Amino acid sequence: MDLGNLRQSYKKASFDVQDALENPIEQFKKWFEQALESDLSAEANAMVLSTVDKNNRPSARVVLLKSVDEGFVFYTNYDSRKGEDLANNPYASLTFFWAELERQVRIEGKVEKISPSKSDEYFKSRPIGSQIGAIASPQSRIIDTRDELERLVKSIEKNYEETNFIERPKNWGGYRLIPNYMEFWQGRESRLHDRINYLLKEDVEERYASPWEIVRLAP
């Protein structure tokens, strides 16, 4: 298999410092809306969450972005591998790639748990099957067969046959990554890509000055 000749020519758009909004989260929202409007074949809110385990080794997986406020919110089992990683080291990164737009966004920062009330609110909005799955699955733990998982689900289903209310399990909920670094990548021809970087300043001297420094990086 020769992968060396797999090449894509990027010509759809450009991105420069003067085009960048002052706040990177607002810039993300703009690009995200464009990704949604582009009728992507994959989920536009799919993102790679990268964490560091207790042995300082990287670990990555795809999760779904569920809201954007002062940070980027996703939900999972707190006892999962990523949950254990974040309990040990709260710093993580997110990566979005929208191939149809030839765009990538990289985000780094510190992760915190969202409030229990917010986790409750989102849990209630999920389909019943997803709620039961969150309770039944011992996420990231070894199971012998899929039959074992399905038996766990059926057991939980029986417990809720006569009610429409399922309480959120305490080991399941939301996280928010608060960014201190964001990079917007726009593919360009001849691999001379546009990379616009937002770096959070440690000290902001002027009262109304932006806390973000915006620079261009070489591709």
Image (tube, rainbow, N blue to C red):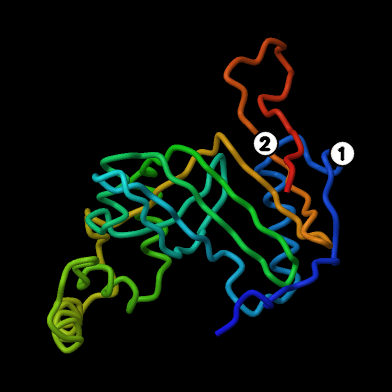
Q: Is mark 1 on a helix, strand or loop?
A: helix
Residue farthest toward the bottom in the current orientation of the protein: 147
Quadrant into which the N terminus falls: bottom right
Foreground pick, 137 / 213: 213
The kind of residue on which mark 2 rests is Tyr
Residue beneath the point at 48% across and 47% down: 93
Residue 113's tag is none
The residue that mark 2 highlights is: 198
Q: What element carries label 2?
A: strand
Crowding near pointer 2: few (<14 within 10 Å), some, many (20+)? Answer: many
Crowding near pointer 1: few (<14 within 10 Å), some, many (20+)? Answer: few
Q: Which of marks 1 and 2 is nearer the N terminus?
A: 1
Left or right of residue 65: residue 18: right
Instruction: Say if 143 sits above or below 63 in the image.
Output: below
State the image coordinates of residue 4 (x, y, percent, origin top left): 64, 74
Residue 18's tag is 1
